Image (tube, rainbow, N blue to C red):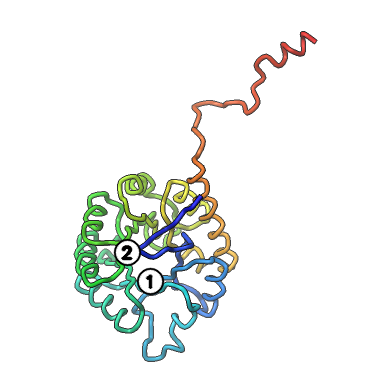
């Protein structure tokens, strides 16, 4: 079965997207990406040292990967727009993950400011992927603003708590025609498989891999989980029964033995 993920007109092979933060040693990123076999990697623009590219985190990203700069640190639309323009001017391409956070306790994204930034940057030719609190009304406005996908959080960013927003993510999957990429809070491969089984287009995660004692092995585990979840979705999950149902019913079996 042909199963393509198209984002902004680009055919993306892998449905696992990884980040580049929180590693104790950035040199391991190359091995993580090879194990994950992902096509897209995010990087916070504020962490990129353009004056010393040899020492920058992007120096550890293999050629051929899609670099997805994010506007981490932006507190409003204007700051996000400025960071996006800076990233493109510095050669990071025209993909951008809009991340606008002014809530310093829970780190929830500001959907209103995100919509404003999406509209401006999409008009300027960016492939915009907005990170958002999973709200259907906001998601629809992001689609109208020109987003290439929507990226609802599963749980607070960096928490590894899993899919706490499952019902709301399910609504977005069923109602939004663009790719729905679940981002933030995914802490285990089983969490990733869960949202992929629901029909999510992809998952983006960073902390679960970067903070594992063995990031390379964990990246490989997430790769398999995403593949398994997607295949389960395509196959179609079996119905949930209210009570036990025998796989091999005994009806008539003992009677036939008595007849013998």
Residue 46: x %, y % from top left:
34, 79
Q: Which mark is residue 68?
A: 1
Left or right of residue 2: residue 105: left
- Whole-angstrom CA distance, mark 1 to mark 2, is 9 Å
User: SS at mark 2?
Assistant: strand
Pointers 1 and 2 in contact (C-beta within 8 Å): yes
Which SS class for mark 1? strand
In the rendered structure, find residue 129 and report the number of the disc placed on it. 2
- Residue 221 location, quadrant: bottom right
Q: Position of residue 245 (x, y in %)?
A: 58, 26
Name the residue rendered at 22%, 72% in the picture. 124
Farthest residue in the top direction? Answer: 259
Quadrant in which the C terminus appears: top right
- Which picture quadrant has residue 75? bottom left
User: Residue at image x 49%, y 63%?
Assistant: 208
Q: Is residue 84 above or below residue 116?
A: below
Q: Residue at x 26, y 49 (%)?
A: 136
Location of residue 85 in the rendering, given as x and y in whole percent from the top left corner = 26, 78
């Amino acid at each position: 079965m042909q199963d393509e993920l198209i984002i902004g007109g680009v055919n993306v092979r892998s449905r696992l997207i990884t980040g580049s933060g929180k590693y104790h040693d950035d040199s391991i990123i190359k091995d993580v990406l090879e194990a994950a076999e992902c096509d897209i990697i995010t990087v916070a623009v504020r962490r990129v040292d353009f004056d010393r590219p040899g020492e920058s985190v992007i120096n550890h990203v293999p050629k051929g990967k899609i670099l997805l700069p994010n506007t981490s640190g932006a507190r409003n639309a204007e700051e996000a727009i400025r960071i996006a323009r800076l990233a493109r001017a510095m050669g990071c391409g025209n993909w951008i993950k809009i991340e606008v956070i002014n809530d310093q306790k829970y780190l929830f994204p500001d959907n209103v400011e995100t919509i404003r930034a999406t509209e401006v940057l999409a008009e300027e030719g960016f492939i915009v992927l907005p990170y958002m609190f999973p709200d259907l009304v906001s998601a629809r406005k992001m689609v109208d603003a020109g987003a290439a996908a929507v990226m609802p959080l599963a749980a607070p960013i960096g928490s590894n708590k899993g899919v706490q927003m499952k019902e709301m993510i399910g609504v977005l999957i069923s109602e939004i025609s663009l790719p729905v990429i679940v981002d933030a809070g995914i802490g285990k491969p089983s969490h990733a498989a869960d949202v992929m089984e629901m029909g999510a287009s992809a998952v983006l995660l960073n902390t679960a891999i970067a903070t594992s004692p063995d990031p390379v092995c964990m990246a490989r585990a997430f790769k398999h989980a995403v593949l398994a979840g997607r295949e389960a979705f395509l196959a179609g999950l079996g119905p949930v029964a209210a009570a036990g149902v025998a796989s091999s019913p005994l009806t008539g079996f003992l009677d036939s033995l008595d007849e013998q």
